[in-house]
Amino acid sequence: MSDSVMKANLEVRLIHDGRHWVVCYQTLQIRGRTLPELDQNLAECLRERGDFPDASQVTVFMGFDFETLPTWLRQYAYHYFNRYALLQL
């Protein structure tokens, strides 16, 4: 990746409920047992909603909600939980 900052088309909240990764977007909650499954399910949801043109590539920033972590754990490299996903719709 270049030195420029990646621009997101969409920003969502990311949590883990103990079994699934969960993306929270507006009134939706999209789940996946793995991150690739989550990405696939999110792409399918966005495709069905029609939020973006068909066959477009969407950059999604998933910001982890640190309030879901125990307080003592929050000090450890929180940025590792944030991620970008490039989704093909």
Image (tube, rainbow, N blue to C red):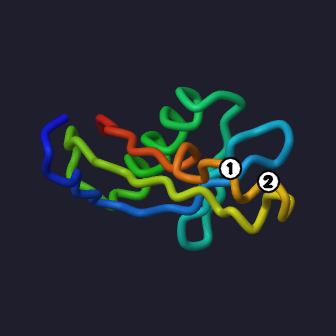
Asked if the residue at tag 1 contacts the one at tag 2, i.e. Cβ–Cβ closer than 8 Å, the answer is yes
Please, what secondary structure does the residue beneath circle 1 have? loop
The amino acid sitting under disc 1 is Tyr
Which label was assigned to residue 73?
Answer: 2
Q: Amino acid at mark 2?
A: Leu
Q: Position of residue 45 (x, y in %)?
A: 49, 48
Residue at x 20%, y 52% (from the top left corner): 53
Picture residue at 49% right of the left edge, 53% below the top: 62
Q: CA distance from mark 2 to mark 1?
A: 6 Å
> In the drawing, does residue 32 fall left or right of residue 41?
right
x then y, percent, for residue 69: 80, 58
State the image coordinates of residue 63 (x, y, percent, origin top left): 52, 58
Neighbour class for label 2 at 10 Å: few (<14), some, many (≥20)? few
Quadrant in which residue 87 is drawn? top left
**Label 2 residue SS:** helix
Residue position for label 1: 76
- Dividing the picture into quadrants, the one containing residue 84 is top left
Q: Is residue 64 above or below residue 25?
A: above
Disc 1 residue crowd, few under 14, some 14–19, many 20+, Cα 10 Å: few
Q: Which of these two is toward me, 3 or 38?
A: 3
Q: Is residue 26 left or right of residue 44?
A: right
